[in-house]
Image (cartoon, helix red, strand yellow):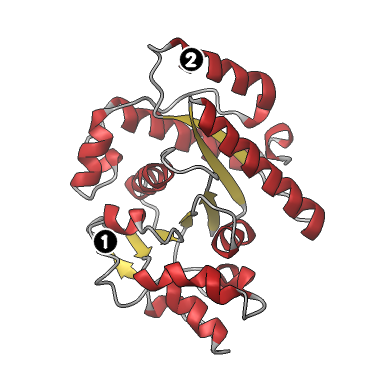
Amino acid sequence: MRIWAISNQKGGVGKTTTVASLAGGLTAQGETVLVVDLDPHGSLTSYFGLATESVSHGVYDLFHDAMERNQPDPLRHIQRTDVEGLDILPATMALATIERQAASFEGLGLVIRQALRHLSGHYDTVLIDSPPMLGVLMINALAACDRLIIPVMADFLALKGLERMLRTLEMIRHSRGQSHPYLIVPTLYDRRPRVSREILEILSQRYGDHLWSGVIPLDTKIREASQAHLPIAIYRPSSRAAMAYGTLLNFLLEQEADKTPEVLSA
């Protein structure tokens, strides 16, 4: 069971869309997929038509079990989506309290990693939507995953978020000896503004082999797909965004098979 986290310390860069799009592409290939919403804003939960204020079970229950010293059982809290083969561990409103509660409990940084061990054999792939701020929820995403995907918009504020994200990875590498293979993915890309092309060039110069050679284009079909609560690969497979995400997914799967050392080293 592969576990990929999608994270960046900047909101609005296409994290949730990337999770949903990759999940849709994997299910279209016949895989069983679980998506995990670790963002208290619950964007991924809303994407698949669930309301965080009315969902009764979800990710928070795993943390509650850990705080109560109970064995977490993720299968009790997983919900189905309207996409065959695609399930979700949704965010609930209580998830927003985790950062405050974490100060009173030790060991909450590995809750998701430990819970997902119980799902081996149930899913082919787990995709984690991480919050945009460094805290116990992001630490859980990074501790649980075996690959990190970092969506980045072509603007200077997004570059700053990427820099913070990479500093976080370096901090984890030093403190825990845990190295994360990661791939930077340009998202919501509009080639018309000169600044977009300039930032893409900066990304190429600074991050080399860690940068995916393609881009996810700005595409109105992405918004329509989210409103339909469907991954773009299912809603409009012929759209530019769906084809770009399909190319990205194939690259990730081929890279996983090849284990290319230049890209997989963190």
Q: Residues within 10 Å of mark 1 (few under 14, many from 20)?
A: some
Q: Does residue 167 sit above or below 172 in this rendering? A: above
Q: Does residue 20 sit above or below 138 in this rendering? A: above
Q: In the displayed structure, does residue 26 sit left or right of residue 136?
A: left
- Which image quadrant for residue 203? top right
Say which quadrant the N terminus sits in: bottom right
What numbered label is drawn on residue 141?
none
Q: Residue at 59% across / 60% down in the picture?
A: 135
Q: Nearer the viewer, residue 95 or 235?
A: 95
Q: Position of residue 22 (x, y in %)?
A: 41, 44
* Residue 235 visible, this angle: no
The amino acid on which the numbered mark 2 sits, given as a three-letter code, is: Val
Q: Does residue 200 sit above or below 166 in this rendering? A: above
Q: Position of residue 197 (x, y in %)?
A: 49, 13
Q: Which badge, 1 or 2, is on the more N-terminal residue?
A: 1
The residue carrying mark 2 is 195
Task: Tell me the distance, in whole angstroms, between the alpha carbons under discs 1 and 2.
Answer: 39 Å
Tag 2, which secondary structure? Answer: helix
Tag 1, which secondary structure? Answer: loop
Q: Nearer the viewer, residue 163 or 140?
A: 163
What numbered label is drawn on residue 81?
1
Q: Residue at 35% across / 69% down in the picture?
A: 93
Q: Does residue 124 sit above or below 23 in this rendering? A: below
The amino acid on which the numbered mark 1 sits, given as a three-letter code, is: Thr
Q: Residue at 38% across / 58% down in the picture?
A: 41
* Residue 149 visible, this angle: yes
For discs 1 and 2, the disc positioned in front in the rendered view:
2
Q: Position of residue 65 (x, y in %)?
A: 50, 84
How many marks are shown on the rendered structure? Answer: 2
Q: In the displayed structure, does residue 81 sit left or right of residue 197?
A: left
Q: Residues within 10 Å of mark 2 (few under 14, many from 20)?
A: some
